[in-house]
Image (tube, rainbow, N blue to C red):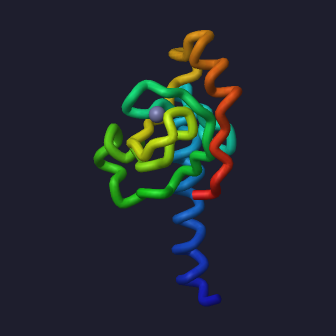
């Protein structure tokens, strides 16, 4: 690996870490147990890794949407991460009962 390639790689990794930290600070549990809500209001747990759309950094509200299969309603939908602080007791119960363990 050339020094230039290595520095590009390191810059990419640094960006991913920054995004993870930023989202965690905002109250999102980004990682393997991220609670998300679909367009119909279903709540479930999924894997949400940062960096899937670095190109869309300027469009923050949009890049936190993702097309995904909802295991609660068994339909394809757009999902967004939910802040842990915004979860109701029912949301938490639904999230703990519904895990989507697909690797993105
Ligand atoms: Zn749903």
Q: What residue is at 50 percent from the left and 34 percent from the top? A: 73
**Residue at position x 55%, y 16% from top?**
87
Q: Residue at x 60, y 84 (%)?
A: 3
Can you say whether 43 is above or below 50 in the image? Answer: above
Count of marks placed on residues: 0
Q: Please tell me which residue lies in front, 95 or 6.
A: 95
Residue 78 coordinates in the image, percent (x, y): 39, 42
Which image quarter is the C terminus in? Answer: bottom right
| Residue 74 horizontal side relative to residue 92, left or right | left
Location of residue 29 in the rendering, given as x and y in whole percent from the top left corner: 61, 33
Which residue is at a point 63% across and 57% down the rendered structure image?
Answer: 103
Query: Can you say whether 11 is above or below 77 in the image?
Result: below
Furthest toward the top, the residue is 89
Q: Nearer the viewer, residue 73 or 35?
A: 73
Q: Is residue 23 above or below residue 8?
A: above
Q: Is residue 65 left or right of residue 29?
A: left
């Amino acid at each position: 690996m050339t020094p230039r390639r290595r520095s590009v790689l390191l810059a990419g990794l640094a960006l991913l870490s920054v995004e993870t930290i930023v989202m965690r600070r905002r109250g999102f549990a980004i990682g393997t147990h991220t609670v998300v809500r679909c367009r119909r209001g279903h709540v479930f747990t999924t894997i949400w890794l940062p960096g899937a759309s670095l190109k869309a950094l300027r469009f923050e509200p949009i890049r936190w949407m993702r097309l995904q299969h909802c295991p609660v309603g068994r339909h394809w939908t757009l999902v967004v991460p939910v802040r842990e602080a915004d979860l109701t007791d029912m949301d938490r119960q639904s999230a703990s009962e519904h895990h989507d363990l697909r690797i993105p």
